[in-house]
Structure formats: structure tokens, C-alpha cells
Image (tube, rainbow, N blue to C red):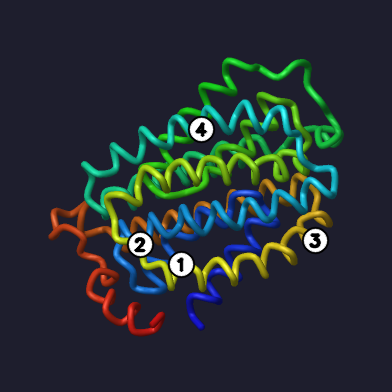
Amino acid sequence: MLLGAIGLLLGLLLGILGGGGSILTVPALVYGAGIAPKPAIAMSLAVVGVTSAVGSVWQWRRGKLQSRVALLFGLSAMAGALVGARLAVLLRGDVQLLLLAMVMVAAAVGMLRGSGAPAGAEQRLAAPPRTMLLGTTGVVVGIMTGIVGIGGGFLIVPALTLLAGLPMADAVGTSLVIIAMNSAAGFVGTAGHVAVPWQATAVVIVGAIVGIAAGTRIGGRLSATQLQRGFAVFLLGVAAFVVYANRALLTGGPPDGSRATARVAVSATITA
């Protein structure tokens, strides 16, 4: 029940924000379902990848998917995700969670600073996409995906608007394809080093697929400015919680001191 609710919320956020759900997945699995950080990261990559793939089909049918941009960014991100997954083996789980919080804060600040775009910005298409910058950004996003288990939508969406000149609605739709590609590569690189709880993962995926259908419809009714500001506030809130939950690491406490590690057995019982 709990895991299904987490999946439903994930799907709603993916449908509305493109990548918002992927940011929430790891903290929700760790602090909500009591799963240890590293298995939670592997689960997140599987859940976000499958759900984003389903959502991208709906976005394509709505005409909100730019396939050429998705392919360029997605292939670069996949390469980076494989590298990031290898680097993640060297890091403790709580360190990965704090890195996730830091990236979320940086992304939120960037989006809040850019939220005052001109009224016609949503309809604007910039000149030719900046191919080199898109590819480089894709690699960076992929590395972060492999390390902290997120699809990277919170970086992909602004990159698509700024570097590819896509309107916000198209950027959200296109980001789902890229997230699916990115997450698939990250999962391949991560799964070999972590025991994946497949039954729990399947429950979250089912809930997320249900949620993304509603989220896609809700997102289509919101303006670009509302999406951007809401996305940024959401990121800051989740980042603050993750830092608080891992404050022992910052103050010299024991490794992996979150309550999540102690509740893994409870989570396994719930999902059995």
C-alpha cells in the first residue's frame, strides 16, 4: 500500500514536471519505505525509467516530444550514466544522498532566477540548438544519474529550454524520453553491484504508471511560469529534508545513520 502510494505520487510529478518525480523517488524510498540508500537508488532508476518511457508515449501523442533533441541529449546522458554508476560504487549511501540534495538546491536556485522570463517565452523557439553544449550537459546529467539515482529531469528541462530553445511544455515532454534512456543506462551500471528488491520495484512502477496519466493532463493546464516556480520550491523542500535526515554525516556522526537502514526488514515485510 505504502509503496503503491509512493509510485502514484511519483507518476503525478513525472507527468506534471517531467523530472520532479525522479527527484522524490530516492528520498521517498529511503525515508518513507525504509529501504537502504543503495538499493533505493537502483529501484529509483528502474521505476523512473519505466514510468518515463510510458509517459513519453503520451507526450508524443500530444505532440510535445522533440525526437531529434531527445536522441542527441539521451545518448550523451546514457554514456555519462554508465560512468556515474561505476563511481557510485566508491561512495557511501549517505554521501550519495547529500550529493543529491546539493544538486537539487543548485537546480532550484537556477530555475527561480530564470522564472521571470518574458510573457512570450513559452512560445519562443531559439535559433539552432547548441549541439555541443547539449551533448556536454547530457554527459554531466548522466553522471549525476548514475551516482544518485535520479532521471535528471530537473537539469534536463532547463537545459532543453535554454540550449535547445524548446517551450516549457515541449521540454517537459521531451525530457521523459531522455530520462528513460538515462535511467536505463544507470540501472544497467548499478544493478550488478546492488541486490534489487524486484517485487517492491514492481509495486512502485504500477502505482507510478497510474499516476503519470493524471499528471500529464494536469501539467497541460499549467503555465510555464507556474511549472518552473513550483518545481523550484519543490526541489528546495526535498533538499532541505534530505540534508536534515543526514545531518549526522555533516557533524561527524556514524555512517549511514539514517533510520532507513534500521527499517529495511520492516520494508521487506511490507512488500512481501
Which residue bears the numbered disc 2? 196
Mark 4 or mark 3, earlier in chain = 4
Q: Quadrant of residue 12?
A: bottom right
Which circle, 2 or 3, is nearer the viewer?
A: 2
Mark 2 or mark 3, earlier in chain = 2
Residue 201 numbered tag: 1
Q: Residue at x 72, y 37 (%)?
A: 116
Tell me: residue 249, above or below residue 79: below
Which circle, 4 or 3, is nearer the viewer?
A: 4
**Circle 1 residues within 10 Å: few <14, some 14–19, many ≥20:** many
Which residue bears the numbered disc 4? 77
Which residue bears the numbered disc 3? 217
Q: Secondary structure at mark 3?
A: helix
Residue type highlighted by circle 2: Val
Q: Secondary structure at mark 2?
A: loop
Residue type highlighted by circle 1: Thr
Residue 42: x %, y % from top left: 39, 55
Closer to the camera in the image, 130 or 223: 130
Residue 123: x %, y % from top left: 86, 34
Tell me: residue 225, above or below residue 272: above
Distance from label 2 to label 3 (Cα)? 32 Å
Residue 213: x %, y % from top left: 73, 64
Residue type highlighted by circle 4: Ala
Mark 4 or mark 1, earlier in chain = 4
**Circle 3 residues within 10 Å: few <14, some 14–19, many ≥20:** some
Picture quarter with the C terminus: bottom left
Distance from label 3 to label 1 (Cα)? 25 Å
Which circle, 3 or 1, is nearer the viewer?
A: 1
**Circle 2 residues within 10 Å: few <14, some 14–19, many ≥20:** some
Residue type highlighted by circle 3: Arg
Residue 177 numbered tag: none
Circles 4 and 1, Cβ within 8 Å, touching? The answer is no
